Image: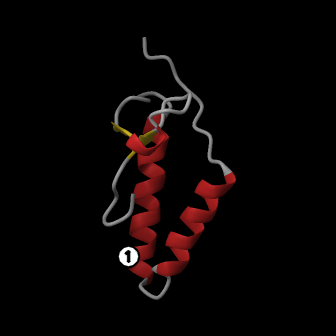
């Protein structure tokens, strides 16, 4: 059985996602596609927390930090 984990969006992550959304706002179809894909990928993390690569920038911090590139966005 896979242990589900809670995915926590900190304020910086929320601001980053909003910035991504705003950045591609002029290309509505692309914006929706990218945000939808990011959301879809995040939903899979609760059941598969080690699915993505380890984030090297946070390797010395406590926690299990992962990242995923969606399009040109990390």
Q: Which residue is mark 1?
A: 30
Q: In the displayed image of the protein, which residue is found farthest to the front?
A: 60
Secondary structure found at label 1: helix
Image spot of residue 19 (x, y percent): 56, 72
Q: In the displayed image of the protein, which residue is found farthest to the bottom?
A: 26
- The front one of 57 and 2 is 57
Q: Residues within 10 Å of mark 1 (few under 14, many from 20)?
A: few
Residue at the image point whose x is 48% and y is 40% from the top: 58
Instruction: Report the side of 7 relative to 68 (left or right).
Output: right
Residue at the image point whose x is 54% and y is 33% from the top: 61
40 in relation to 5, above or below: below
Image spot of residue 68 (x, y percent): 36, 49
Instruction: Report the side of 31 relative to 17 (left or right).
Output: left
Residue at the image point whose x is 44% and y is 45% from the top: 57
17 in relation to 61, above or below: below
Q: Quadrant of the C terminus?
A: bottom left
How many numbered callouts? Answer: 1
Image spot of residue 14 (x, y percent): 62, 58
Picture quadrant where residue 13 is located:
bottom right
Q: Quadrant of the N terminus?
A: top left
- The front one of 36 and 10 is 10
Q: In the displayed image of the protein, which residue is found farthest to the top?
A: 1
- Is residue 55 something one can see in this rendering? no
């Amino acid at each position: 059985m896979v242990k589900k984990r809670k995915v926590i969006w900190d304020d910086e992550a929320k601001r980053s996602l909003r910035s991504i959304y705003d950045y591609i706002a002029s290309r509505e179809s692309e914006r929706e596609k990218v945000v939808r894909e990011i959301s879809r990928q995040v939903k899979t993390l609760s059941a598969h927390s080690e699915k993505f690569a380890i984030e090297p920038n946070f390797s010395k911090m406590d926690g299990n930090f992962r990242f995923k590139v969606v399009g040109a966005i990390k």
